[in-house]
Image (cartoon, rainbow, N blue to C red):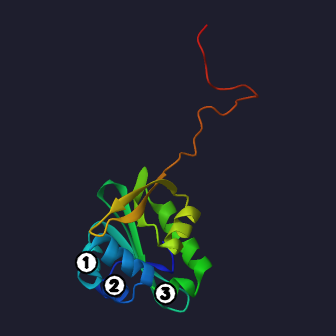
Amino acid sequence: MSDYIHPITEEAAIYVASHLRDDDYREVKEGHGHEPLLHVPHSAFCGDTVWFEVPNGKTAGLAGVQEGGLIWMLCTNAIHDYPLTFAREAKRFIESRKEELLWNIVDKRNTAHLKLLKFLGFKFLRELKHGPNQLTFIEFCRVRTSNCNNNRPINGRSSSRTSS
């Protein structure tokens, strides 16, 4: 896929769980009620998961897609070393997905992830209370669009037909 996106390894999962960005740590711990070092390495092997590297060789994060298009990402501070590279690689990962719908919820306080989700083409749907602390999360989704457009004009005329 890329020089910066790799199949999940136990080492990468443990590293990310041990070095989460503060906002990601709060989302896992306060928002979902999970202990990152216990939950993240286990969850990383559910579904299709990758780990991201940045040009200086640091591990930047994990991302995965589980059954039904449930997508998630957790990051280390290394994403801030190369923000454009990381965002482009995240987009490469998203564009490689075949699911019609990708979705999840994100902690409203996690502004870096909100900005990244917007860049990746996700739409924000609604706010809701979630987890043991009833924190505000935002539901988001991305629907795959086809390159085929059945209503494209053909020879200057619309291809949609009506009966007379």
Q: Mark number for residue 77? A: 3
Residue 153 sits above or below residue 63 on the image: above
Residue lying furthest right: 156
Q: Which residue is mark 1?
A: 39
Q: In this figure, which residue is indicated by the disc labeled 2?
A: 17
Decide which of tag 2 and tag 1 comes sooner along the chain: 2
Crowding around mark 2 (Cα neighbors within 10 Å: few <14, some 14 to 19, many 20+) is many
Please state which amino acid type lies under the numbered disc 2: Ala
Neighbour class for label 3 at 10 Å: few (<14), some, many (≥20)? Answer: some
- Residue type at mark 1: give it: His
Q: Is the residue 131 above or below the residue 34 in the image?
A: above
Residue that appears at 76% across and 28% down:
156
- Mark with earlier residue (2, 3): 2
N-terminal of the two: label 1 or label 3?
Answer: 1
Labels 2 and 1 touching (C-beta < 8 A): yes
Q: Quadrant of residue 15?
A: bottom left
Q: Secondary structure at mark 2?
A: helix
Could you say which disc has been placed on residue 93 in the image?
none
Report x, y in % for residue 60. Answer: 46, 83
Residue at 29%, 66% in the rendered image: 131
Q: Position of residue 70 (x, y in %)?
A: 35, 59
Q: Quadrant of the C terminus?
A: top right
Q: Identify the amino acid type marked 3.
A: Asn
Q: CA distance from mark 1 to mark 3?
A: 19 Å
**Left-right relation of 24 to 36:** right
Q: 84 left or right of 49?
A: right
